[in-house]
Amino acid sequence: MHRHGAIRRGDIPTILEGDEEPGTLVIIDGEFGQALAVSVTEIRSALRAGWSVWGSSSMGALRAAECRPIGMRGFGSIYRQYASGARSSDEDVAIAYDPDTLRPLTVPMVDIDHVLDDLRTHGTLSERTSAAVRDELRSISYRDRTVETTRTAIGRAGPAAASRFADLEQGSGWSLKDKDARLMLAVLSRVLGPADV
């Protein structure tokens, strides 16, 4: 099994040109601002070559929703949002990251929406306040929407919202992208076996 960083245009042809037997290709993260994004045509080529292609969480969820009719499999909440049409913008999963460490530097809208849904569910934010916070954060470019910016916007909604967000941060329970990626790994482990994941 091979592990790669965020997928970009040209990665799949490189895999197909290798001497590996077709197996399972999993797409989670992908580039689209820093480099050309993996294309539907590349995914179609992998499927035709006998590869099973799965996607979740970020670029994987986007492409799985687009390529579902040709056989790509999608997993997770973010995939379902794109597949159902409830979400359509590529920028909703976009982040900026450190190219050396691959550490995320900003927060995607899918995670912000997930947090705001949690705050509404717990009665910490009203629908109106949640919508106002969402609009404020959506107006900021994904390249500038940091955790601190997110924390500040939510904190202005009141101490209860700030406290709940702090709890979510500490428990690492606020990233829907992370949850979906972990779901994908759990599914792969059951299907392929833990030694292959």
Image (cartoon, grey):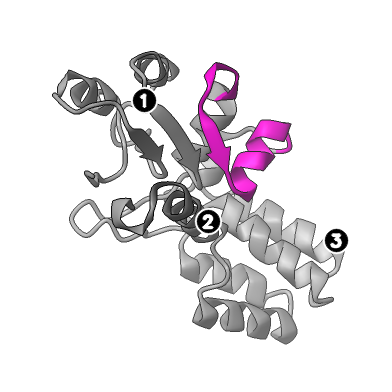
Work out whether 88 lies above or below 110.
Answer: above
Q: Quadrant of residue 23?
A: top left
Measuring from the top left, give residue 156's x and y in whole percent: 68, 75
Work out whether 95 lies above or below 10.
Answer: below
Instruction: Give the residue number, with chain letter if any, for mark 1.
Output: 51
Image quarter where the N terminus lies is: top left
Instruction: Give the residue number, with chain letter if any, for mark 3.
Output: 128
User: Three-letter amino acid code at disc 1?
Assistant: Trp
For disc 3, the neighbor class at 10 Å (few under 14, some 14 to 19, many from 20) is few
Instruction: Give the residue number, with chain letter if any, for mark 2.
Output: 183
Q: Earlier in the sequence, mark 1 or mark 2?
A: 1
In the rendered view, does 90 fall on the left or right side of 6?
Answer: right
Residue 90 showing in the rendered view: no
Q: Which label sits in the foreground, 1 or 3? A: 1
Residue 79 is inside the magenta segment: yes
Residue at the image point whose x is 30% and y is 51% from the top = 196
User: Three-letter amino acid code at disc 3?
Assistant: Arg
Distance of label 3 from label 2 (alpha carbons): 32 Å
In the image shown, does 10 or 196 lie closer to the viewer?
196
Q: Earlier in the sequence, mark 3 or mark 2?
A: 3
Residue at the image point whose x is 46% and y is 36% from the top = 54
Distance of label 1 from label 2 (alpha carbons): 21 Å
For disc 1, the neighbor class at 10 Å (few under 14, some 14 to 19, many from 20) is some
Q: Quadrant of residue 9?
A: top left
User: Three-letter amino acid code at disc 2?
Assistant: Leu
As helix, strand or loop, the secondary structure at mark 3 comes to helix
Asked whether disc 1 touches disc 2, contact meaning CB atoms under 8 Å apart, the reply is no
